[in-house]
Image (cartoon, grey):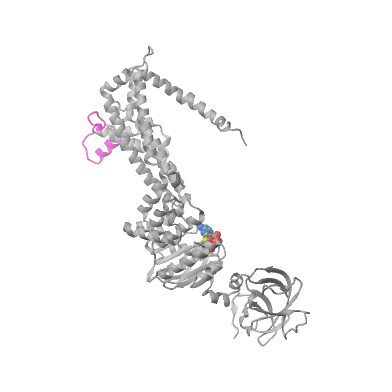
Amino acid sequence: MYPRSLPYLLLLPSTLFLCVFFLYPFGLVAWQAFVTDTGQFTSEFFVEMKSHWKFNTAFTNTILLALAVVPFQVCLALYMATLVNGMKRGRDLILYIWTIPLGISDLAAGIIWLAIFEQTGFLNSMMQGMGFIDQPVSLLSYQNTGMIFLAILLAEVWRATAIVLVILVAGMGLIPKEYYEAAEVFGAGRWKRFTKITLPMLKPSLQTAMILRVIMAFEVFAVVVALGGTNLPVLMGEIYTWQFDLQDANVAAAYALVILLISISCTLLIMWGLRTPKEARV
Amino acid sequence: MAIIQIKGVAKQYGKVHALHSIDMTIADQEFMVLLGASGCGKTTLLRIVAGLETATTGEVWIGEKRVDKLAPKDRGIAMVFQNYAVFPHLTVYENIAFGLRMAKMEQKEVDRRVERTATLMHIEGLLKRYSGQLSGGQRQRVAVARALATEPQVLLMDEPLSNLDALLRMEMRAELKTVLAESNTTTIYVTHDQVEAMSMADRIAIMNGGKIVQASSAVEVYRNPAAHFVGSFIGNPPMNFLTADNSGDGFWQVAGVRVKGPDTSQKSIQFAIRPEDIVVHGKSGDGSTASEGAFTAGVRILEPLGSHLLASCKVDDQLFRVVLNSDAEVQPGDTLQWSPQADRVRWFDPETELALSTV
Ligand SMILES: Nc1ncnc2c1ncn2[C@@H]1O[C@H](COP(=O)(O)OP(=O)(O)OP(=O)(O)O)[C@@H](O)[C@H]1O
Ligand SMILES: [Mg+2]
């Protein structure tokens, strides 16, 4: 027998780590968002944040981006994972190739896609070369936020689908083959096997992947800056602006809390939506 | 109509020959049992019929259709898996209903069938549970119920009762046999329990090392083993074998006794007799007159089994088992005088291991 305190003792290092590097900074940010320099509680920073004309746009853009990117990525990753899992050989090779974008920083990814979409970029030269347009057009101009949005979406999908893919491939690999065989014998075709076996048994992995991705999606920044500059404001960009351009750390902290809040709500929503009853776990 | 025809089916896993050219026809509504030791290829054969495994060569026909290129779901089969494969994310009810849902059956009919098969398998009280909340035997019965619920043309069962206690197994055996006799299902049933095989089968196919050695009725397999393996595998205790040396004119020298046997020119063959087909005349030296040409057997070990007494003896230095009356007065060390029931003696060729006819 070990002493009763042993588990707590073993948890201590990671708890300390969390406190020093997460809880403490978090406390500081929260303090900054609610307390003035003279030490008084206030909501003025939130009011200031909310009344700024860019807040609503940034908020909407961030949510829209997440709503467009994450479901698309999850579907794509599911499809890719199914393909990879069905492969008899070359599986690892394909997986390595598909995960290359993971090794590229998000700013670099933004710049790669900028090289495609800008006025002198690959897309323009290609369209010109094929005779669709007479002269290069400015695709990512401020009149064209739809196009900017699309470019960001593509870059994000290209950059970060692989992380979802890796989690899902691992999850699918854990589903025993016998369940597919049983389903097949009892009349389930490909699609039914996917919806009746793969999806329900993949729930835990889907949960992890989606939480990770959604949080990343709310923090989208570098790709947006590279492709849209300030033409498509997002929450993270606003934090940067307030902190460094406008030198107002308090409002920046208020923004940070907003991102935290929507991240937590989404996480809870996903956890609830993809829960598995305890007794139904494998 | 679902005649199953297996034509020249062989299966190789790399260098391992799991099945050697199997030929077998299973009649419509027949209950065929595959019986054999562990690793002899029973599951492999069943999975080939189901379409979960592709044969290296050969054809499988169900009814009038060649099915070996069809997907499992297009073969009109249901299967009980050796490892159950009961879906953990579905309740027992939904597990049993799985095949019915796939066939888009009406809810009322689904209810009726789930109810019926669950009752049959004595799991009607577990319908709301998940597989993780069941014992191994209960899970196995869910797997059987799931297969029965679809009322298939062809039912493939891979050791469906292996995990039940003796009493429940006996009960399930009888119930399964009754339902299947009422339905018009053709069944292939895998087991390595020979009592189960004998009690349920219309025909038993005995497999050994990837081959079917004999496929006949239980009595035929027991009485007239087609090969040495069948005789030594079926029956508890199995058949006795003694070496027989040719003494010409169809007579053979078996443990010092001259016996009429098959008329072949081989130097030595095998004489075989079941332990219960032996007539014991008495013990040597107890005064009873030994009949002419009787065999002797030195008793080594006695096992009182209630219904009878099993004596392991030595005959001509070969192991020989005799079934005696449970009240027979025998001690280890005694020498028994016995003779075989003439019509029950069988002969085997030691090279081909096949039975020799005595005409
Ligand atoms: N995927 C595989 N790869 C290689 N060899 C295999 C494979 N599956 C089965 N075998 C071999 O084929 C032979 C037959 O296996 P099978 O599962 O059919 O046996 P079985 O008769 O069902 O045995 P048991 O009574 O133990 O279930 C065995 O020797 C086994 O090792
Ligand atoms: Mg098996």
Q: Main secondary structure of the magenta part?
A: loop
Answer above or below: position of B288 versus B170: below
Please state which of residues B38 and A114 is positioned toward the viewer in this rendering.
B38
Please state which of residues B291 and A241 is positioned toward the viewer in this rendering.
B291
What residue sits 51% from the left and 26% below the top? A16
Quadrant where the image shows the N terminus of chain A:
top right
Per the image, is A104 magenta? no
Question: So how many labels did they put on this image?
Answer: 0
Residue at the top extreme of this rendering: A38
Q: Is residue A93 visible?
A: no
Where is residue A244 shown, x and y percent of the image? 35, 19
Please state which of residues A75 and B288 is positioned toward the viewer in this rendering.
B288
Answer above or below: position of A119 versus A195: above
Residue at the left extreme of this rendering: A134
Q: Which quadrant would residue B291 be assigned to in this image?
A: bottom right
In the displayed structure image, the side of residue B157 where residue B296 appears, left or right: right
Where is residue B229 shown, x and y percent of the image? 60, 71
What residue sits 31% from the left and 58% below the top? B106
Q: Which quadrant would residue A60 be assigned to in this image?
A: top left
What residue sits 43% from the left and 52% below the top? B87
In the displayed structure image, the side of residue B137 where residue B284 appears, left or right: right
Where is residue B145 shown, x and y percent of the image? 43, 60
Per the image, is A125 magenta? yes
Please state which of residues B2 and A77 is positioned toward the viewer in this rendering.
B2
Region rendered in magenta: A120-145
Answer above or below: position of A220 versus B170: above
